[in-house]
Amino acid sequence: MSPPTASRARAMAAFGVALQCLMLGALIAGALTGRAALSQAAAVLALLWLGTQWTRLIPLARLFAALAAAGALLLVPLLPGAGPKLATALVQGTGFAALMMVLGLLRQPVKRAEVTRRAAAYLLSEPPRRRYGAMLAGAQFMALMFNVGIIAMIGDLTRTAHGPDPGRDPARRAMVMAAMRGAALVTIWSPLSLGFAIVTTGVPAIEPLQLVAVAAGFTLLLLGLLGLWPMLPAEARIPAAAGPAATGSARALASMLGASALLLALTLGLHALSGLSFTLAAVIVLPAFSLGWLLLEPARGQSLGQRLGGALLATADLRSESALFLSANVIGAALSLAIQASPLWPVISGAGFASLPALLACLAAIPLAAALYLPNSVMVVLAAQIFGPTLLGQEHPLALGLTLCIGWAVAICVNPISAMSLIAGRLCDVPPARIAHAWNRKQALAILALAALLVSLVYACGG
């Protein structure tokens, strides 16, 4: 890269960071003051930022952005009142995009911390028969801070312990799969996950803390069962005689779990005290938590300003995901408005659809659509926006919330184009479709069967 080109790239990156910071500031200020104009300004800034990132977005993100724009332009002149509702969806989508940005901000300092690697390595030192379960549980809680980065970290740690072709090592593959599945399971209950944010936003009658409690209990049950029965093919199982894949520190693991618990407690506390949505609570807490991490971490020859600059640049790491989720929220709102204007709406919103079969059909449809390469965000956003205001969402919000959250987590595992499937496929040296459709199929069916029992029980209890 020539000096002028490099200088221009740095200037564009700095401009993008400035737009993101302004957008986050406007979004947070709008939420704290209740001024809609600030939230709307944040949405405009988000669109400007995505415009500067257009050439760096993946094709799917550009397609969804174009579909969102086309849908809005088509509906506004056709349906009275569509404009304000689509504007609201855009502001909500901006909140989802902001969550992706601040997750990138946190991931940067956590990624280079020695304590993180030592904590993950400790899980890899467990005996073969306990190693998968330990990694499944540990990765779930570490993913609160590290998100999908936990999968790549486990891949890196296990690569150093094997020969020239680590991608085909069964023990390494098992650990990568445990990390992937643990990171997916945390989305069932974590208020820091995007799926949870979409569900609690789209189903107004839901009690978020109740959803967290029930979903976390269900996830703990899954961790116990799946830890004992990994349901992996022979090519991705740990040999009984396998030695430790790495050595780490129990104290480091305890520190990481404590940091994850603190992050979760701060988010829950801010939500409870302020009444802000979990999305906005996380958007406020995560930057503050990241700054605290930067202040406490060793300098390693870099000033605080340099480390902060690197972390701010990382807010653009998930640019495509930000564009996808923002666009998906607008697309979901557009489809929801179209359905509400159709003859189907009286049927969907009536008592006939406020039924257990409708919930179970939705539970199955979300992973099925994902397995057919449709991003899970589209189905979950659409289901939340359609069923949230109906009799089903009003009378059985907890059952609907569990359906969508669990469906989201399973969809991540069976979607060949999800970030987790793509990363796991690369590290395991197999096509992502094989990860999604073959290696994760049995686990997905088992989770769906247990989820059907849970949803049926909650529905019968009136939740």
Image: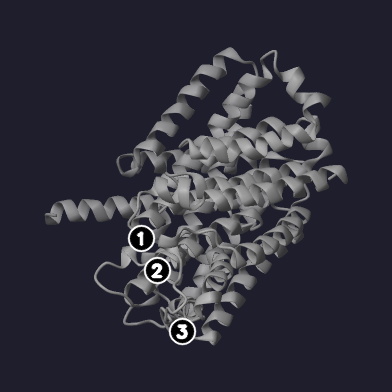
Direction from residue 355 to residue 62 in the image, left or right = left
CA distance for labels 2 and 1: 9 Å
Q: Which three-letter amino acid code belongs to the residue tagged 2?
A: Arg
Give the image location of residue 166, x and y in percent: 31, 68
**Dot 2: few (<14), some (14–19), or many (≥20) neighbours within 10 Å?**
many
Q: Earlier in the sequence, mark 2 or mark 1?
A: 2
Q: Please identify, in this view, whether the residue under mark 2 or under mark 1 is nearer the observer.
A: 2
Q: Nearer the viewer, mark 3 or mark 1?
A: 1
The residue under label 2 is: 172
Q: Position of residue 180 (x, y in %)?
A: 49, 59
Please name whichever residue, 135 or 43, is drawn nearer the observer in this view of the structure.
135
Residue 240 is situated, as x and y percent measured from the top left of the image, at 47, 76
Task: Tell me if label 2 and label 1 are in contact, CB under 8 Å.
Answer: yes
| Residue that badge 3 annotates | 248
Q: Do we see residue 217 in this rendering?
A: yes
Type of the residue with mark 3: Gly
Q: Which residue is mark 1?
A: 427
